[in-house]
Amino acid sequence: MLFKPLVLIVQLILEWLRKRKRGDASAPLPAETVRVVPLDDQHYTWNWAFKPAAAGQVRIMSARGHFHLTAIDPGVTVGIIRTYLVIWYWDRWRFRRVKAGGDAMVSDGRGYEGIWSRTYTIPSGGTREVSGYWLIDPSIRQEGDARPLRARPYFVDQLDNPHSSRRKITFQFVA
């Protein structure tokens, strides 16, 4: 009775020692590499956009915002590979959540005067301004509905870790 659990424990310890000896038990990849800080509320807007379709132009929603991203891990230069926006809203009698994909443009460190690109990295310990653009397709609002949009943006780094601001952001309608 006592023999089976004892053998199992010894096997687990031996396997752990073998992995440790080979170097397989290395430190995991960092998960917290970026801090996302939203700029002022005037920098978050949504409006109507059009998408080409077989039947003509289809109306969709477009949101954009500006953020400061800081690489906080001392050993990692961060690259943003994708971004998405998670939107919460009421649809008649139930609460819904929609995930919309988008693009993130990283500045070269000179702000608006500089060059913006999807391929720029954020150096370790450095801060860069990032502009996010998201397309919400299909649209969650009817035409003429100009209510604010509540959402939380996520920026995904090269290690596939999503990073977000600590609060939801209100996107105001701009005609």
Image (tube, grey):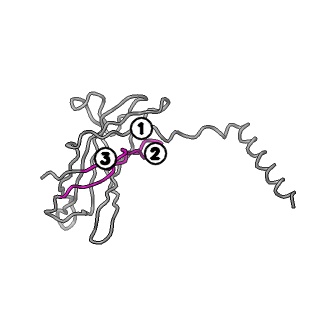
Distance of mark 3 from mark 2, alpha carbons?
Answer: 16 Å
Give whichever of 109, 31 is nearer the camera.
31
Label at residue 103? 3
Q: Is residue 106 above or below residue 95?
A: above
Identity, as a three-letter code, of the amino acid under mark 2? Asn
Which of 166 and 64 lies nearest the eye of the viewer? 166
- Whole-percent x and y of residue 112? 22, 32
Q: Position of residue 18 (x, y in %)?
A: 75, 41
Q: In this view, does 20 lie above or below 99?
A: above
Q: In this view, does 97 lie to the left or right of 76?
A: left
Disc 2 element: loop
Q: Residue 1 sits in which quadrant?
A: bottom right
Residue under label 1: 34
Q: Give the range drawn in magenta.
A: 147-170
Q: Which residue shows up at 30% across the image and 28% down it?
A: 109
In front of the other: label 3 or label 1? 1
Q: According to the image, label 2 marks what residue?
A: 161
Examine the structure image and report whether residue 152 is included in the region drawn in magenta.
Answer: yes
